[in-house]
């Protein structure tokens, strides 16, 4: 939570990020309108979200259910057209809260979680979009479905649970060339008929756009260091 003396220039940062998205889209022969900017506000207080909203930002990302629960209910009342994405791990005991709060859940990564989400959606009628997180780097400590299991996972989550899956997300290993991971994610999406691709963060979003990202998740470049 920034104090006034070190407050980042959120309006200026947002304008800069948007200009870079536009430029990367044009360079790739894509329409900037096809790329959603997910402003990742984790660790920043509600006033940072308000500042971004006042500058035209509507889509926000959070990586912890509990933090989002504390932050967004009042913001949602103020700003009904705010769209909220969960981009961090989801435990099955938080599924009820997540379905109530988020519009997009980007981190579906286990059949047990898919089943719990489907049951909650059935019960409440609230139907957040779901993306499957793919562990493109096959890192043991990282969440996500292994690339080799992705097709079967998507098929089962759809067929067995009727989960509204329409996208994929990945977080490439820090040390790797991200383009390889973005290309892999795009290929898995293509063969499974998934249209949304959530990939690219502050350090690599232009590359992600070149590889077809429809959602870029950007925190630091907008809100400053955490
Ligand atoms: C924090 C986070 C981001 C944003 O990262 P920056 O480098 O600050 O842009 C994107 N995706 C996920 C999953 C995150 O946890």
Image (cartoon, rainbow, N blue to C red):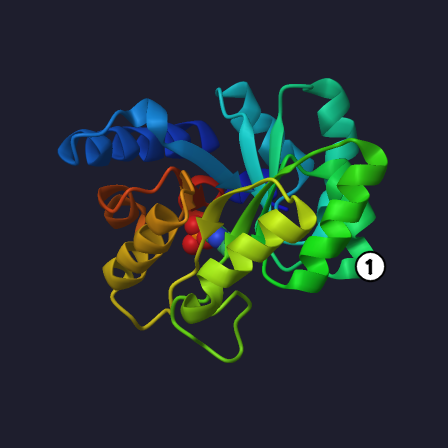
Give the SS element for disc 1.
helix
In the rendered view, would you say 171 is above or below 50?
below
The answer to whether residue 75 of the structure is visible from this angle is yes
* 207 or 111: nearer the viewer: 111
List x then y, in percent, for residue 90: 69, 57
Residue name at image x 73 percent, y 46 percent: 118
Q: On the rendered structure, is 29 left or right of 196?
A: left
Query: Mark 1 — residue?
Result: 93
Residue 176, image x and y in percent? 29, 70
Q: Choose between 42 and 197: the one closer to the eye.
A: 197
* Residue at 42% across, 75% down: 138
Query: Of all residues shown, which one is farthest toward the bottom?
Result: 140
Q: Position of residue 184 (x, y in %)?
A: 31, 59
Above or below: residue 160 compared with residue 194: below
Q: Is residue 70 visible?
A: no
Neighbor class of circle 1 (other Cα within 10 Å; few <14, some 14-19, many 20+) is few
- Residue 217 quadrant: top left
- For image coordinates 21% across by 36% down, the residue present is 24
Answer with the quarter of the image where residue 79 lies. Answer: top right
Q: Residue at (59%, 35%) from the top-left corner?
A: 48
């Amino acid at each position: 939570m920034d104090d006034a003396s070190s407050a980042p220039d959120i309006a200026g940062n947002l304008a800069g990020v948007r200009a870079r998205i536009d430029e990367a889209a044009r360079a790739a022969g894509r329409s900037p309108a096809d790329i959603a900017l997910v402003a990742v506000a984790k660790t920043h207080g509600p006033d940072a979200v308000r500042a971004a909203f006042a500058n035209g930002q509507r889509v926000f990302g959070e990586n912890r259910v509990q933090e989002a629960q504390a932050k967004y209910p009042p913001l949602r009342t103020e700003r009904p057209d705010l769209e909220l994405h969960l981009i961090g791990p989801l435990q099955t005991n938080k599924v009820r809260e997540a379905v109530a709060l988020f519009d997009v859940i980007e981190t579906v990564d286990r059949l047990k979680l898919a089943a719990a989400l489907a049951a909650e959606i059935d019960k409440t009628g609230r139907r957040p979009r779901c993306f499957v997180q793919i562990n493109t780097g096959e890192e043991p400590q990282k969440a996500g479905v292994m690339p080799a299991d992705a097709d079967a996972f998507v098929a089962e989550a759809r067929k067995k649970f009727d989960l509204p899956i329409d996208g994929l997300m990945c977080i490439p290993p820090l040390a790797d060339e991200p383009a390889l991971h973005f290309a892999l994610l795009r290929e898995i999406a293509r063969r499974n008929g998934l249209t949304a691709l959530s990939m690219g963060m502050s350090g690599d979003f232009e590359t992600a756009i070149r590889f077809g990202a429809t959602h870029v998740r950007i925190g630091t470049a907008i809100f400053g260091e955490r």
